[in-house]
Image (cartoon, rainbow, N blue to C red):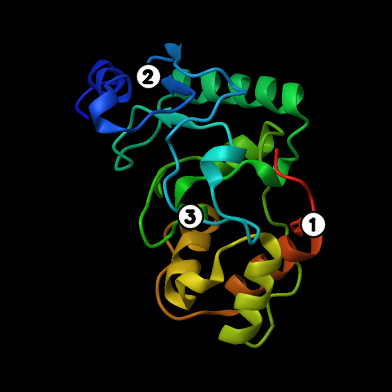
């Protein structure tokens, strides 16, 4: 949408059948549209940690940004505070903070390569890899196994999962799978494995 106000109108319009719990404008203005304990239509079809129906077990936050430009400071500050508050209310672990491109990599590319996941991690509101061994042989099977452990929907295919991981943790990386990719995904899998037996939130 061209503006936060236009997005707000669309998100509140029943005929479009799309909604979210919160919308944050570029200037940091915040709207709540759905109560946190109610289901919103923000996710669509996708999978995280081997479980679908993401709408029924998540709180959706939309940001007024095309994904092609950096996210402004007031917007990032408002988002950080909001995530911190939501995590506190619902006991959401750090690895429970994900983007649309994480759980639906073939359908969604937001928040995009310009989104500052690293800043969010520095603020204590998301995970960030700390790989040590970058000499691992790049192998698609091993990459997908670790990606599945972290939570990615590996049924989407190797290329989609690699791109989703890079969008978030190596936004400007290109080319074939390499040792850095392997080190990142193994570190994420080792430190933040998804508990596939946990009940839905």
Residue 145 place in picture, x, y as percent: 67, 77
In the image, is residue 85 above or below residue 144?
Answer: above
Residue at image x 64%, y 60%? 151
In this rendered view, identify the residue nearer to me: 133 or 83.
83
Q: Which mark is residue 25?
A: 2
**For the residue labelled by badge 1, is the local secondary structure a helix, a strand or a loop?**
loop
Q: Residues within 10 Å of mark 2 (few under 14, many from 20)?
A: many
Q: Please tell me which residue is depicted at 76% across the width and 59% down the height of the picture.
A: 193
Say which quadrant the N terminus sits in.
top left
User: What is the secondary structure assignment of the residue under circle 3?
Assistant: loop
Give the alpha-carbon distance from disc 1 to disc 3, as whole Å. 18 Å
Residue 135, given in percent of the width and then of the height, sits at: 69, 82
Residue highlighted by disc 1: 197
Please tell me which residue is depicted at 68% across the width and 72% down the height of the picture. Answer: 146
Which residue in the protein does label 3 denote?
A: 46
Real-space Cα distance between discs 3 and 2?
Answer: 25 Å
């Amino acid at each position: 949408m061209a503006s936060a106000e236009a997005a707000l109108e669309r998100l509140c319009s029943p005929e479009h059948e799309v909604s979210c719990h919160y919308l944050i404008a570029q200037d940091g203005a915040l709207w709540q549209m759905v109560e946190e304990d109610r289901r919103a239509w923000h996710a669509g079809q996708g999978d995280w940690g081997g479980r679908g129906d993401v709408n029924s077990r998540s709180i959706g936050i939309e940001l007024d940004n095309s994904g092609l430009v950096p996210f402004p400071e007031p917007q990032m500050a408002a988002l950080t505070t909001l995530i911190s508050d939501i995590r506190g209310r619902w006991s959401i672990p750090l690895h429970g903070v994900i983007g649309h491109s994480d759980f639906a990599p073939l359908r969604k590319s937001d928040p995009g390569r310009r989104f500052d996941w690293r800043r969010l991690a520095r603020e204590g509101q998301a995970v960030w890899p700390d790989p040590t061994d970058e000499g691992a042989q790049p192998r698609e099977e091993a990459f997908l196994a670790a990606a599945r452990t972290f939570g990615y929907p590996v049924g989407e295919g190797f290329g989609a999962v690699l791109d989703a991981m890079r969008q978030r943790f190596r936004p400007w990386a290109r080319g074939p799978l390499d040792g850095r990719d392997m080190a990142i995904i193994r570190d994420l899998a080792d430190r933040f494995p998804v508990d596939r037996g946990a009940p839905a939130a």
